[in-house]
Amino acid sequence: MAARRLSLLLSRSASSNLFLRGSPGDTVTISRLTRGAFSYSTSAAIEEPLTPSVKVDYTQLLINGKFVDSASGKTFPTLDPRTGNVIAHVAEGDSEDVDRAVAAARKAFDEGPWPKMTAYVTTLHLRLKDQGYFCALLICLKNIMMKLQHLRLGIMESHMNRLPKLKYQWLCVFFRYYAGWADKIHGLTVPADGEHHVQILHEPFGVAGQIIPWNFPLLMFAWKVAPALACGNTIVLKTAEQTPLSALYAAKLFLEAGLPPGVLNIISGFGPTAGAALSSHMDVDKLAFTGSTDTGKIVLQLAAKSNLKPVTLELGGKSPFIVCEDADVEKAAELAHFALFFNQGQCCCAGSRTFVHERIYDQFLEKAKALAVNRVVGDPFKAGIQQGPQIDTEQFEKILRYIRVGVDSGATLETGGERFGSTGYYVQPTVFSNVQDDMLIAKEEIFGPVQSILKFKDLGDVVRRANTTRYGLAAGVFTQNIDTANTLTRALRAGTVWVNCFDVFDAAIPFGGYKMSGQGREKGIYGLNSYLQVKAVVTPLKNPAWI
């Protein structure tokens, strides 16, 4: 039963709690506090932003196969981070809406066709018809989907197109990957000590609650939804309040492709209301959350205090990027730059602690500084732009406060450090040198375009310091020596270690963290385990010919 339905067809909240205090609107001017900081041009940011030709049609909640208003009738604005202007008003779901969505998901699981489809038939149905139909819809509407997400996130299209795994076809690839698993989820027959037949079944949990972040909303939608459906669960998914539009549109495509009502339900709303209601709901059987570590603790606590539902957590990180003595400095600087500044630094696995061997430190620093100075910041809809705005004013102010704390703690601000332009949530690409392990900018997740460069002496030194963190999501190693690479990959306590590369993702590669970066894994075969329960069935054998 567990293996059938994705074959039918084919959001912290990432916003971390503020660790630094300051009044909203406190923008920081840093260059006067430091020596040698580069000046920055703001001309690109103050130009009139482009207006994408996209109409936002889906702003309601999706419950039981229909788009509906919230029970309270409330809405909230979703904003354009380039300007702070309102894009659309979206239905604000709360506990009553979560109750309605969970009831629909429960009915779809207990009484609907979804859990009763055979794996073989539905896999054929998916591969020959519905999967192709869903993917065709997705690809045909790629530009609309991109504009919806870019409008909210500021991810530039040309940059996305240079990264094939972030193209929208990749979303289709992800669903195809788990469609391939849907008819391969099977149990075991095991020998027992005595005259008994023992079979092990892998069964869906039932209703899966899912909470996704804002930094990659469409990809996180796929990471959560695809394995849950492949295993036969029904879903209530809460979007991040900053980015509700793309999931609503993707869900509409699922409905067009024939997904039964109630199997996928989408709630937009806020963490303390909709998120808390979903996490503590007594009829939700399984919970998955991606976001900040502090919010993840709250989610885990709510799940435990309600019905002790199992929880998968993909949380924050402070990933080390280690540049060894033998590294090609120019290539290492370019990769370290990408590892940190990708997606405006709004990436949980960003290489935000750049450890560089002391013998090449100065050379590396000059190249890293030049890359940051030459990084093109502005409207992501315009050609040639490499960095757009941060997601919202809260994240924008938080980043600037961390920069101020970095200066006050004695780190050297090499470049950047200020707001970029006079409108929107743009932050200059920022580089700190002479960063020490006990500084806040080296310990806490900034989630912005701020590179901290630290110096190390030898492998023992860097392993000890890289592991001295509450996080363990990812790490990067840059070396030409295979023995060095082997030593570091085994010593680093992180869920993913990239060697001479970074941010390489694939549907088959598991992702998740050690320590306070989370529990459980997403993607690959390990992603299935999060949505399956194991049942042992024992039956006596009467006069067996063999045991």
Image: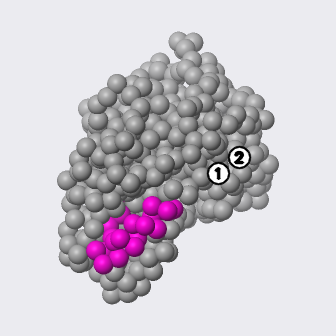
Crowding at dot 2, Cα within 10 Å, few <14 / some 14-19 / many 20+, comes out as some
Q: Is residue 50 magenta?
A: no
Residue 74 quadrant:
top right
Q: Is residue 379 above or below residue 371?
A: above
Query: Image quadrant for the C terminus?
Result: bottom left
In contact (CB < 8 Å): disc 1 and disc 2:
yes
Vertical relation: 308 (above or below) 375? above
Residue receiving disc 1: 385
Please report the bounds of the magenta region as a residue range: 353-371
Horizontally, is 142 left or right of 97 in the view? Answer: right
Question: Which residue does the image show at 41% across and 52% down from the upper left?
Answer: 37
Image colouring: one colour
Q: Residues within 10 Å of mark 1 (few under 14, many from 20)?
A: some
| Viewer-side residue, 481 vs 117 | 481
Q: Which mark is residue 512?
A: none
For residue 368: magenta? Answer: yes
Residue 150 visible here: no
- Residue of label 2: 382
Q: As rendered, which of 481 and 1 lies closer to the eye? A: 481
| Element at label 2 | loop
Residue type (three-letter) at the residue carrying disc 1: Ile
Q: Residue at the location (57% across, 12% down)? A: 73
Residue 53 in which image quadrant: top right
Vertical position of residue 444 compared to residue 179: above or below: above
- Give the x, y percent position of residue 298: 30, 35
Residue 217: percent from left, percent from top: 55, 43
Say what amino acid the circle numbered 2 marks. Answer: Lys
Query: Where's residue 273, x and y in %?
Result: 41, 23
